[in-house]
């Protein structure tokens, strides 16, 4: 099972979009693993829309939410960060669901 302690991979005090891209790359490298990928946020307060959007929001735009739920496990995430993350993932999932097969937004 792949386990990423976020504080070890993203060592800056303020996490950036580039840090989120780095985390997303790590996740994608293990996406097909048999076991879920564990993201451990121990000791961190992220509070960065950019970090969450780049790391997990873009995955929610690519994969259905039920697949994200099967493939990813969050541990030790701050409650406020969880709310922020859920909002970003939900928003990106709606974008994916609204896109047509050719990648263009479906008319509303």
Image (spheres, rainbow, N blue to C red):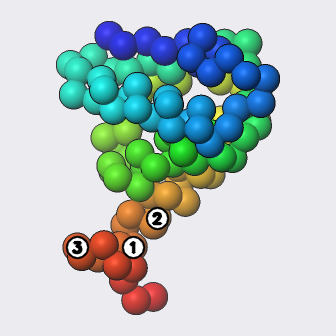
Q: Residues within 10 Å of mark 1 (few under 14, many from 20)?
A: some
Question: Can residue 32 be spotted in the picture?
Answer: yes
Name the one closer to the observer, 17 or 65: 17
Residue 2 vs 99, above or below: the answer is above
Distance of label 3 from label 1 (alpha carbons): 10 Å
Q: Secondary structure at mark 1?
A: helix
Quadrant in the picture for residue 104:
bottom left
Mark 2 near mark 1, Cβ–Cβ under 8 Å?
Answer: yes
Name the one closer to the observer, 90 or 21: 21
| x 62%, y 51%: residue | 87
Question: Can residue 81 be spotted in the picture?
Answer: no
**Residue receiving disc 1:** 98
Mark closer to the observer (3, 1): 3
Residue 108 vs 3, above or below: the answer is below
Q: Which mark is residue 101?
A: 3
| x 41%, y 45%: residue | 59
């Amino acid at each position: 099972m792949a386990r990423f302690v976020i504080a070890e991979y993203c060592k800056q005090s303020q996490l950036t979009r580039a840090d989120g891209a780095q985390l997303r790359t790590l996740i994608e490298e293990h996406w097909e693993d048999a076991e879920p990928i564990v993201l451990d946020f121990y000791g961190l307060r992220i509070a960065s829309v950019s970090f969450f959007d780049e790391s997990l929001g873009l995955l929610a735009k690519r994969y259905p939410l039920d697949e994200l739920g099967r493939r990813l496990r969050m541990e030790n995430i701050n409650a406020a960060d969880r709310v922020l993350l859920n909002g970003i993932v939900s928003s990106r999932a709606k974008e994916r669901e609204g896109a047509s097969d050719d990648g263009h937004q479906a008319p509303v």
